[in-house]
Amino acid sequence: MNRTLTGLVALAIAATTALTACGTESTAPTGGGEAAGAGDPRSLTVESSDDACEVSAAEAPAGVLTFDVTNTGSQVTEFYLLDDDGLGIVAEIENVGPGATAKLTVNAAAGTYRTACKPGMVGDGIQSDFTVEESDEQVQVADAALVEQAESGYAAYVEDQSAQLLAKTREFTELYKAGDDDAARALYPEARTHWERIETVAESFGDLDPLMDAREADVPAGEEWTGWHRIEKDLWPARAVDYTPLTTAERARYADDLLANTEELDSRVQGLSYTVDSIANGSRGLLEEVATGKVTGEEEYWSRTDLWDFQANVDGARVAYEGVAPVVEQKDAELAARLNERFAALQTLLDEQRQGDGFVTYDQLSTAEVKQLSDAVNALSEPLGNLTAAVLS
């Protein structure tokens, strides 16, 4: 199926993080049997339970689709719109808590897809075929020149960050294999900055992200843990119990594997095209990465370098937003003003934690400082949740 990447990662709503997605409020479950908008074939409902994923229709016309997702199960769930092979992520909603709802808005081209719910956020999920049919509808998205500028600018940004990630990863893995641990530890958060800025793009390649960025607790039983965080633990083993350092040969194997996957990622992003809704969804998805991993201090468990990642996710979200901002300003100037204000407020708080060329480690933050950052993320998530709908209105 040939089409542009029509969505990256859509913002989730979870009861535990108090995020609001795309104008959706948490409500009591209403069931998945009726369309969210009566008579509108592009408005669908999804009911995700512990053992089922019920989508209100198996097909829809091409254009702007909305999926209203309700979690009627007992576990946190995710909802995906996948490519027809079930591997490539077109768009997703993460961390939908029990009893919560969330809305995904995406401009979908004609083609064959799969939908999937993932109760417990593990495994391949519960998948079903989904078809987007040809349609005469033309999605109107502001001035064509502004749209083209946003799309080409974001593609250039992703390619540049990927190139920098590859260069830094090559340098990092050489230091690590050589046993120069102090230098490798110093470079680790700097190199990962380039990954975190384009994390939603990297996640769209469903096979690469688990190999490169899985945390230890996220690795399914029986599968090997590889990637950045496997090496992170070896460089910062102080929090581990009875840890056995990797041998020189093991170091070389994990380092070479990370570099090879980074090279593969870089090759895949070359020439990749984006639409304004994929850019907007990517911005929201990056902020969700902050809310679910960085502000909780879970992402960099061993090194405690979460604030480097936090800043990088915010950088990527801001760049994506600023690319489509001229479009938003034409359609909803008030929304653009709120986003500018709240991005600035969050950045002010991050700047307070700077130390030298980087940041303090996460364990140095007080409970009050963590809450301030969390509140600022939630305040930004509310207007950012309306970004996709604004660019597609």
Image (tube, helix red, strand yellow):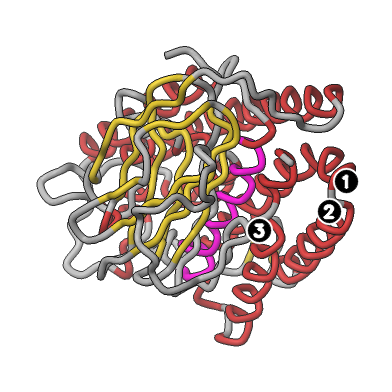
Q: Write down the quadrant of residue 49 in the picture.
A: bottom left
Drawn side of residue 308 relative to residue 113, left or right: right
Q: Secondary structure at mark 1?
A: helix
- Residue displayed at 74% across by 46% down: 390
- Of the residues shown, which amino acid type is indicated by label 2? Ala
The residue segment tinted magenta is: 278-297
- Residue 329: give x, y in percent of width and height: 88, 46
Q: Which residue is mark 1?
A: 329
Contact between labelled residues 2 and 1, with CB atoms less than 8 Å apart: yes
Looking at this rendering, what residue extends furthest in the front direction? Answer: 39
Which of labels 3 and 2 is toward the front?
2
The mark nearer the N terminus, 3 or 2, is 2
Tell me the quarter of the image containing the C terminus: top right
- Residue displayed at 50% across by 63% down: 13
- Residue 130: give x, y in percent of width and height: 35, 31
Q: CA distance from mark 1 to mark 2?
A: 6 Å
In depth, the one of 78 and 191 nearer the eye is: 78
Contact between labelled residues 3 and 1, with CB atoms less than 8 Å apart: no
- Of the residues shown, which amino acid type is indicated by label 1? Glu
The mark nearer the N terminus, 1 or 3, is 1
Disc marking residue 358: 3
